[in-house]
Image (spheres, grey):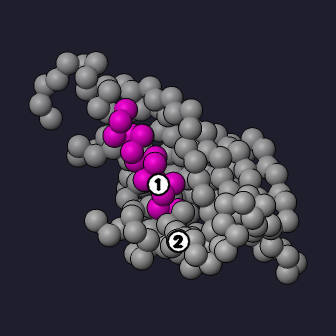
Amino acid sequence: MPERDPEIQALLDKQTITEVLTRYLRSVDRGDVETLRECYLPGAVEDHGGIWEGPASEYVDSIAKGIAHPKSLTSHVLSNVLIDVKGDTAFVESYATTFARVKSDGERYDCFVGARILDHMERRDGRWGIARRQLLWEWNHDVPVSETWVLGMLAPDASAMRMGTKFPEDPVFAG
């Protein structure tokens, strides 16, 4: 790596780390399992807020089928990203607000969840990735599904709307 002003290098590292975190959430929403795997470093550990804990590779295996399913509908929003870089390591606290459509007892619900994510990241062989992740649940709100698109004001005929899809069909993967 070329010698740079330490403040400039810290900014570049923070931007790269933010992109890893953003790519992680997009890969979950778009069902891009291989990109999700690439966000973790070899040997990484995932602690998903008490509902899953262990090797990150096994965590990805456990959710791969669900996130790639064509009817899987989620939207993750990353915010409040604080990054403390120390050489080739970084501690990151970020917030995620998540929407997920789920089915329970034959009924569909829209679930909104707030969580914080604590990431220990490392730069190995010039690449930043997640070495250890801990998710902490903050809040949840579940409501019955309603698809009137802003009470019908946005799109009276929703069939005309272009919708996001999964990997590799979504336009984001067109290049």
- Which of these two is toward me, 50 or 12? 12
Single out the mark in the foreground, 2 or 1. Answer: 2
- Inter-mark Cα distance, 2 to 1: 24 Å
- Residue at point 34%, 40% (across, down): 16
Q: From where the camera sits, is residue 64 visible?
A: no
Magenta-span inclusion, residue 15:
yes
The outermost residue toward the left is 2
Residue 44 horizontal side relative to residue 142, left or right: left
- Residue 124 placement: quadrant: top left
Residue type at numbered disc 1: Tyr
What residue do we see at 46% from left, 48% from top?
22
Q: Residues within 10 Å of mark 1 (few under 14, many from 20)?
A: many
Q: Main secondary structure of the magenta part?
A: helix
Q: In the image, residue 80 lies at what x, y percent?
A: 56, 32
Check disc 2 and report the residue beneath it. 162
Q: Which image quadrant for residue 175? A: bottom left
- Magenta range: 14-28
Q: Which mark is residue 24?
A: 1
Disc 1 secondary structure class: helix
